[in-house]
Image (cartoon, helix red, strand yellow):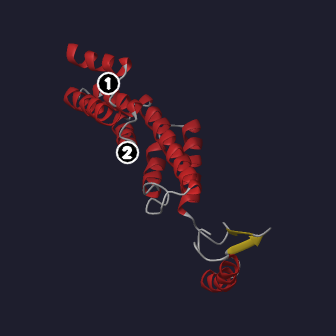
Amino acid sequence: EALWPGAEGDAAAQAFATTLPRLRKLTGDHAIQRQEGRLSLDPHHCWVDAWALERQIGALEDTLHETAGSAAQVTEKLFKLYHGPFLGDEPDQPWILSARERLRSKFLRALESAGVALAKSGDHEAAMVCFRKGLEVDALAENFYRCLIRCCLSLGRNAEAISAYQRCRQMLDRHLGLPPSAETDALYRQIVTG
């Protein structure tokens, strides 16, 4: 139904029977597997960006358990793999939305973990890259703003910290009609009172 909407059962089955051999001819006989009436891609013969993204998130988690020092290199690879919402140009089908949110959430959690680890190790510049990238994906993620503000303060960049707070306040007000949390406001007061 997803591939041939509006086609009757027999017509869709015929289209499938015709398309599968053509697809195998294009991709190779072993790239597409058929088991129990389901098709899937063989990971040994196909590269899928979503799979690569999940592997890179796993590699980042492993790196963070060992040392934060190489986290910046692993996050660079992560940035190159995340190109925005999963199937972002496709209509919002339940199976797409589920996969989209799962990948987005994993990506954001990985960025937050990497950024926090980098900040703890003293690499505030690399941490800020993680937090800014997270805000590109979710401009309402208040925790990313707080982490960004803390990094700015650690580097003595009060003007950037204030700018990050103001952006947070504007985004939350515009999209949610809410003020920043007490924790975020406390960080702002820390900036302005010195």
Residue drawn 68% across the image and 74% down it: 32
Residue 194 showing in the rendered view:
no
Mark 1 nearby-residue class (10 Å; few <14, some 14–19, many ≥20) = some
Q: Is residue 86 above or below residue 2?
A: above
Q: From the image, tell me which residue sits under label 1.
A: 179
Res 128 label:
none
Residue 165 in picture, x, y percent from top left: 27, 28
Mark 2 or mark 1, whichever is nearer to me? 1
**Where residue 57 sits in the image (x, y, percent)?**
55, 48
Query: Farthest residue toward the right?
Result: 36
Task: Looking at this view, name the residue that lies furthest to the top.
Answer: 193
- Decide if residue 143 is in sight here: yes
Determine the residue positioned at 61% across, 80% down: 27
176 left or right, relative to 35: left
User: Type of residue at label 2?
Assistant: Lys
Quadrant where the N terminus sits is bottom right
The Cα–Cα distance between marks 2 and 1, rounded to whole angstroms, is 22 Å
Q: Amino acid at mark 1?
A: Pro
Answer above or below: position of 22 versus 105. Answer: below
In this picture, residue 86 sits left or right of residue 66: left
Q: Is residue 88 or residue 175 the one in the foreground?
A: 175
Determine whether the residue tagged by mark 1 lies in a helix, strand or loop.
loop
Say which quadrant the C terminus sits in.
Answer: top left
Q: Position of residue 160 (x, y in %)?
A: 23, 32
Q: Which mark is residue 133?
A: 2
Q: Nearer the viewer, residue 9 or 155?
A: 9
Q: Is residue 191 above or below residue 97?
A: above
